[in-house]
């Protein structure tokens, strides 16, 4: 099976964004009188749409959850976005895939403008045909919709040629909903069980291990 179009999640897949996300979540929660120092609780925010995390983990009604995201952005958009680092093996792997003629895309639930800042900051944007991120108004955040947008934009009709790479169940579920294959990477914040339970076609330990799936 030849995968010619490779879609990548961003947070936890290409970069380790935990520090910036965690500190900005804490900043937001403190506004509502909640002190959160549990690392496992904070790690849950890496991956899914933020407002849903505030809703699901802290019982915020939808409107309050979206307001919590606005408070989060006060810190994240200025400071948190740069509290980030590239995951080991990412630049070399992306270059290898690009040099091999593969078409690469970013499919992230992170707001588009912030995704562009991160990818430019680390000089990764040059490897991608297109970067697709979420809207700021919460109307375009679901992973399946983001994947579909890329497939439609580039008229990719042979879904057997497409592979989604991500570290959380949301990436795997989004891929399944759109009928494409997926690989879960354990360099991020999802466990092997989470990725397998979501139905990942492949699970690899290191980011660079995706080369074995795509090129061999």
Image (cartoon, helix red, strand yellow):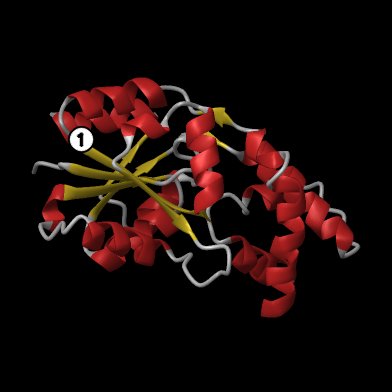
* Residue at the spot 29% in from the left edge and 57% down from the top edge: 150
Where residue 54 sits, quadrant-wise, is: bottom right
* Residue at the spot 74% in from the left edge and 65% down from the top edge: 68
* Residue at the spot 36% in from the left edge and 30% down from the top edge: 126
One can see residue 25 in this view = yes
Residue named by callout 1? 213
Decide: is 93 above or below 18.
above
Decide: is 83 above or below 49.
above
Q: Position of residue 200 (x, y in %)?
A: 31, 52
The image quadrant where one finds the N terminus is top left
- Residue closer to the observer: 10 or 12: 10
One can see residue 61 in this view = no
Decide: is 167 above or below 198.
above
- Residue closer to the observer: 133 or 172: 133
Q: Position of residue 179 (x, y in %)?
A: 21, 63
Q: Position of residue 191 (x, y in %)?
A: 48, 45
* Residue at the spot 32% in from the left edge and 28% down from the top edge: 94
Badge 1 element? helix
The image quadrant where one finds the C terminus is top left
Q: Is residue 202 left or right of residue 43?
A: left
Q: Position of residue 77 (x, y in %)?
A: 68, 47
Decide: is 140 above or below 111.
below
Q: Residues within 10 Å of mark 1 (few under 14, many from 20)?
A: some
């Amino acid at each position: 099976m030849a995968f010619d179009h490779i879609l990548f999640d961003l947070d936890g897949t290409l970069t380790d964004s935990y520090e910036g996300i965690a500190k900005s979540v804490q900043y937001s929660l403190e506004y509502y009188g909640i002190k959160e120092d549990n690392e496992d609780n904070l790690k849950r925010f890496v991956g899914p749409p933020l407002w849903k995390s505030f809703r699901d983990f802290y019982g915020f009604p939808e409107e309050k959850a979206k307001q919590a995201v606005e408070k989060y952005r006060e810190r994240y958009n200025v400071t948190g976005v740069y509290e980030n680092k590239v995951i080991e093996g990412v630049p070399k792997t992306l270059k290898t895939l690009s040099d091999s003629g593969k078409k690469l895309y970013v499919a992230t639930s992170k707001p588009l403008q912030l995704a562009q800042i991160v990818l430019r900051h680390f000089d990764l944007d040059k490897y991608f045909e297109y970067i697709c991120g979420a809207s700021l108004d919460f109307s375009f955040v679901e992973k399946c919709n983001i994947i579909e947008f890329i497939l439609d934009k580039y008229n990719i009709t042979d879904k057997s040629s497409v592979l989604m790479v991500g570290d959380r169940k949301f990436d795997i579920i989004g891929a399944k909903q759109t009928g494409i294959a997926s690989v879960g990477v354990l360099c991020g914040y999802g466990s092997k069980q989470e990725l397998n339970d979501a139905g990942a076609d492949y699970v690899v330990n290191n980011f660079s291990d995706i080369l074995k799936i795509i090129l061999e």
